[in-house]
């Protein structure tokens, strides 16, 4: 009987709806989807609808390689929805893929993480997109809060907990205490901007054109924010701007470090400004306990050491930085009903 009912209502699902990656967690199953936030569509003929060709990894493989008539869309920009219809299509695709007990009645309760500094309208857009994607109930929770829970910080205590989430579209810095956000700052200028800086540097200094996908791979292979014991080097292939022909150069981690330096400085400045506007009692806690880095940007070589030196606080990297928000969503789903009053940022929409 119980099984019948749970099948009737569908499962509880958490979605980290990131600018670069979408991670879907299903209660009782774990992470079932971890895919790029990209969708490939055939452009609409006059009056028609766009036809969805691929979502996630398959769509990302098409970026920069599509013929006319087909386009790849990243429906989120800087952490928020920039293309509502495509976001809804993407959520709907992933929720259906995650929930194998499909069917009309299989309507899950869905918690989606959103950047802390979004407007009420943007928050509502996420709830609406989730509900029209088939959720029975939709909630949103602020990303830094989820990341802090995922990193096992004692956010419910009267204690200063600091999280720096460096994602693809935004860098969010937040101080939490007693289950809520006390101070929060968000800047554009995270992973995507680092990739753009690498594209520009290669154009300017090496007259080589590359795509964003290649820039991201260069960042993974060579990205660092402090001198390395052994500097790295790889061959980069692209199109020469001089004669338009295929060409390659040898690129070193030193050149990449110089190119991304302004973005790293801005991140460091933002953390500093957040500390400056944090009440002194909480700053004392952070001085003693340190701050936690989350998001893919936390994987940049040397970032924790550099921030620790510049800010004079201990800096730790979350165990699985790319999954910190999802791990926090999992904690919320463990007991969604009891978490409702604690997470005052959670909003409910009903179908
Ligand atoms: N090893 C690595 N070194 C540097 N950057 C990395 C590494 N691995 C992943 N990244 C970067 O992390 C970013 C993705 O991180 P994450 O999944 O946390 O972002 P997101 O949640 O999709 O974005 P946002 O939270 O801004 O909406 C991408 O820019 C990716 O290139
Ligand atoms: Mg994120």
Image: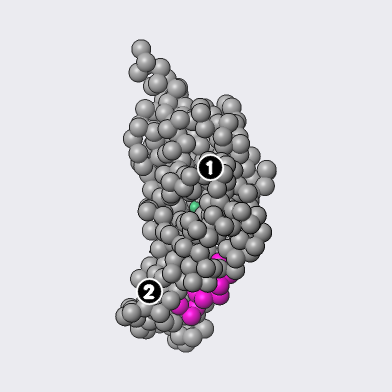
In the displayed structure, 160 sits above or below 102; it is below
User: Alpha-carbon neighbours of circle 2 within 10 Å: few (<14), some, or many (≥20)?
Assistant: many
The number of discs equals 2
258 magenta-colored: yes
Q: Check mark 1 vs ligand 2: CB closer than 8 Å? yes or no.
A: no
**Can residue 276 be seen?**
yes
Which residue is identified by label 2?
Answer: 222
In the displayed structure, 287 sits above or below 15; it is below
**The magenta segment:** 257-267
Quarter of the image where one finds residue 302: bottom left
Mark 2 residue element? helix
Between 265 and 208, the one lying in front of the other is 265
Rendered residue at 58%/31% (across/down): 341
Between 279 and 224, the one lying in front of the other is 279
Percent coordinates x, y for residue 320 in the rendering: 38, 53
Q: Is residue 126 left or right of residue 330?
A: right
């Amino acid at each position: 009987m119980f099984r019948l009912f749970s099948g009737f209502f569908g499962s509880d699902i958490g979605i980290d709806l990131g600018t670069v990656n979408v991670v879907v967690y299903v209660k009782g199953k774990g992470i079932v989807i971890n895919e790029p936030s990209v969708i490939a569509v055939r452009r609409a003929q006059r009056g028609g609808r766009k036809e969805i060709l691929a979502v996630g990894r398959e769509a990302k493989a098409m970026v920069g390689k599509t013929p006319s008539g087909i386009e790849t869309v990243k429906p989120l920009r800087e952490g928020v929805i920039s293309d509502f219809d495509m976001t809804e299509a993407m959520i709907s695709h992933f929720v259906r893929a995650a929930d194998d007990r499909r069917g009309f009645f299989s309507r899950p309760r869905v918690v989606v993480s959103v950047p802390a500094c979004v407007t009420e309208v943007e928050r509502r857009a996420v709830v609406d997109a989730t509900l029209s994607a088939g959720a029975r109930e939709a909630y949103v929770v602020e990303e830094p809060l989820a990341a802090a829970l995922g990193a096992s910080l004692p956010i419910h205590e009267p204690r200063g907990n600091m999280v720096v989430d460096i994602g693809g579209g935004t860098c969010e810095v937040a101080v939490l205490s007693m289950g809520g956000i006390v101070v929060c700052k968000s800047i554009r200028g995270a992973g995507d901007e680092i990739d753009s800086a690498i594209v520009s540097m290669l154009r300017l200094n090496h007259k080589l054109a590359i795509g964003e996908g290649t820039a991201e791979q260069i960042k993974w292979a060579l990205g660092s924010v402090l001198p390395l014991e052994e500097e790295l080097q790889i061959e980069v292939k692209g199109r020469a701007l001089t004669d338009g022909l295929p060409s390659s150069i040898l690129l070193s981690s030193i050149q990449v470090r110089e190119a991304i330096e302004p973005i790293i400085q801005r991140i460091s400045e933002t953390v500093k400004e957040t500390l400056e506007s944090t009440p002194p009692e909480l700053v004392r806690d952070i001085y003693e306990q340190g701050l936690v880095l989350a998001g893919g940007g936390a994987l940049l070589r040397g970032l924790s050491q550099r921030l620790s030196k510049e800010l004079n606080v201990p800096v730790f990297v979350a165990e699985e930085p790319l999954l910190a928000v999802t791990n926090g969503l999992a904690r919320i789903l463990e007991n969604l009903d009891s978490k409702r009053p604690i997470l005052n940022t959670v909003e409910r929409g009903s179908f």
